[in-house]
Structures are given as C-alpha cells and as structure tokens.
C-alpha cells in the first residue's frame, strides 16, 4: 500500500515528529508538510533524506484552499489543536467505493 499523507501545522514541534515518522515509513510515498509558515514547512521537509516530504503553504482559516489541499491526499494528520480556536473540530473526507466522488468538509 502506498499513501499520500499531509500533516497540517507541519512546521510545529508535534508535527515535525509525525513528519519524520511518516517520511521514514515504507508504506508512505509522499508527505505533505503544510503550514502557514512556508519557510518553516520547507525547513522540516528538507530535513529528511528520503525525498518524500514536500512543503505546502496552508492557512486553516482559508477553508476553500484547505479543502483543495487535503482533497489531494489519502490521509490528513492534524496534530495541532488549532481547529478548536476556529470553532471547528476537524476535517471529514467522504469517498465513494469506486473513487468517482470525493467530498471534504470542515466541521
């Protein structure tokens, strides 16, 4: 199984450990390091020699941009608690069994 995973808040301390573990996993092909601090996300992504981690600028307050970003990944990891600050609890992605329809919503 190969996975594409994005880690939100990827420049943060908790997320950096998560990115490391994912980048070193044989089951993961691509790790998105997403953070409003693009330079921080880039520094985290470049730290790993596996060549699987890539930085993305992402602001969780921009709902539509966040939906587009997470829609490109199989798994979204949110090790931060910033959704509570925004009055949201998380992200939910729905996918039809034949992959013909995907929907991502913030809740």
Image (tube, grey):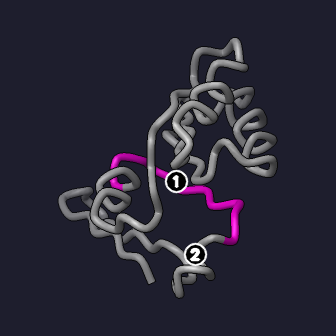
**Labels 2 and 1 touching (C-beta < 8 A):** no
Q: Position of residue 21 (x, y in %)?
A: 77, 36
Q: For the N terminus, which image quadrant?
A: top right
Residue that appears at 57% across and 23% down: 52
Q: Secondary structure at mark 1?
A: strand
Residue that appears at 62% across and 82% down: 84
Residue that appears at 45% across and 74% down: 92
What residue is shown with label 2?
83
In the picture, measured across the screen, residue 7 lies left or right of residue 26, that is left
Magenta region includes residue 76:
yes
Q: Secondary structure at mark 2?
A: helix
Residue that appears at 25% across and 58% down: 98
Q: Residue furthest bottom?
A: 87
Mark number displayed over residue 75: 1
Q: Residues within 10 Å of mark 2 (few under 14, many from 20)?
A: some
Q: Position of residue 64 (x, y in %)?
A: 28, 64
- Tell me if residue 22 comes above or below residue 63 in the rendering: above
Q: Marks 2 and 1, Cα distance to the nearest angstrom?
A: 17 Å
Q: Which residues are magenta?
A: 71-81
């Amino acid at each position: 199984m190969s996975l594409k995973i994005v880690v939100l808040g990827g420049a943060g301390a908790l997320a950096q450990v998560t990115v490391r573990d994912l980048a070193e996993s044989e089951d993961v092909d691509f790790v998105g390091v997403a953070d409003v601090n693009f330079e921080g996300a880039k520094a985290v992504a470049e730290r790993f020699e596996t060549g699987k981690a890539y930085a993305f600028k992402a602001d969780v307050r921009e709902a539509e941009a966040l939906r587009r970003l997470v829609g490109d990944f199989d798994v979204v990891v949110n090790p931060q608690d910033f959704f509570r600050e925004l009055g949201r609890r998380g992200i939910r992605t729905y996918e039809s069994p034949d992959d013909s329809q995907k929907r991502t919503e913030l809740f």
